[in-house]
Image (cartoon, rainbow, N blue to C red):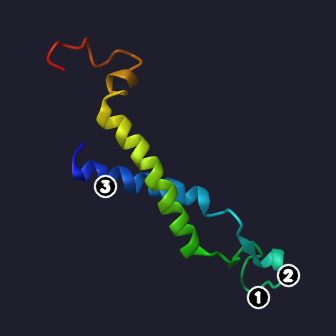
């Protein structure tokens, strides 16, 4: 895996993790009973984005190390994911 592949893998993992972490412990205007006129009651009042970004980075880093290590070690290859044998038989040079 090259540097660019590692960065792209980390970015994909980070954003997927961020979208999972984002709705956790959010306090909406409706929950607090202070709905600003012209906004939806589900609009966040306290979102804690900085804290969630740091939590996301930590989780993504651990997942990236595990997934990257698995890819680099060769424990799982693209051929393992080829369920319909579209890649053809493996040759001795692979």
Considering only order in the chain, which callout, 2 or 3, is on the residue closer to the N terminus? 3
Picture disc at residue 33? 2
Left or right, 62 with reference to 21: left
Q: Of circles 3 and 2, which is in front?
A: 3
Residues at circles 1 and 2 in contact by the CB criterion of under 8 Å:
no
Which residue is outermost to the right?
33
Could you classify mark 3 by the number of other residues whose Cα lies within 10 Å: few (under 14), some (14-19), or many (20 or more)?
few
Mark 3 → mark 1, Cα distance in angstroms: 43 Å
Q: Position of residue 33 (x, y in %)?
A: 85, 81
Mark 3 → mark 2, Cα distance in angstroms: 42 Å
Report helix, strand or loop for mark 2.
loop
The vertical placement of 53 against 94, above or below, is below
The vertical placement of 78 against 93, above or below, is below
Report helix, strand or loop for mark 1.
loop
Q: Which residue is mark 1?
A: 37
Which residue is outermost to the bottom?
37
Mark 1 → mark 2, Cα distance in angstroms: 12 Å
Q: Position of residue 22 (x, y in %)?
A: 61, 64
The vertical placement of 71 against 79, above or below, is below
Q: Quadrant of residue 50?
A: bottom right
Left or right, 39 with reference to 67: right
User: Residue placed at 39% from the left, 25% from the top?
Assistant: 81
Picture disc at residue 7? 3
């Amino acid at each position: 895996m090259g540097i660019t592949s590692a960065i792209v893998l980390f970015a994909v993992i980070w954003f997927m993790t961020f979208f999972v972490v984002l709705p956790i412990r959010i306090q909406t205007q409706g929950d607090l009973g202070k709905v600003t006129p012209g906004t939806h009651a589900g609009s966040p009042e306290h979102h804690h984005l900085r804290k969630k970004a740091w939590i996301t980075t930590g989780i993504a880093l651990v997942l990236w190390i595990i997934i990257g290590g698995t890819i680099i070690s060769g424990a799982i290859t693209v051929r393992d994911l080829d369920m319909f044998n579209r890649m053809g038989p493996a040759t001795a040079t692979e």
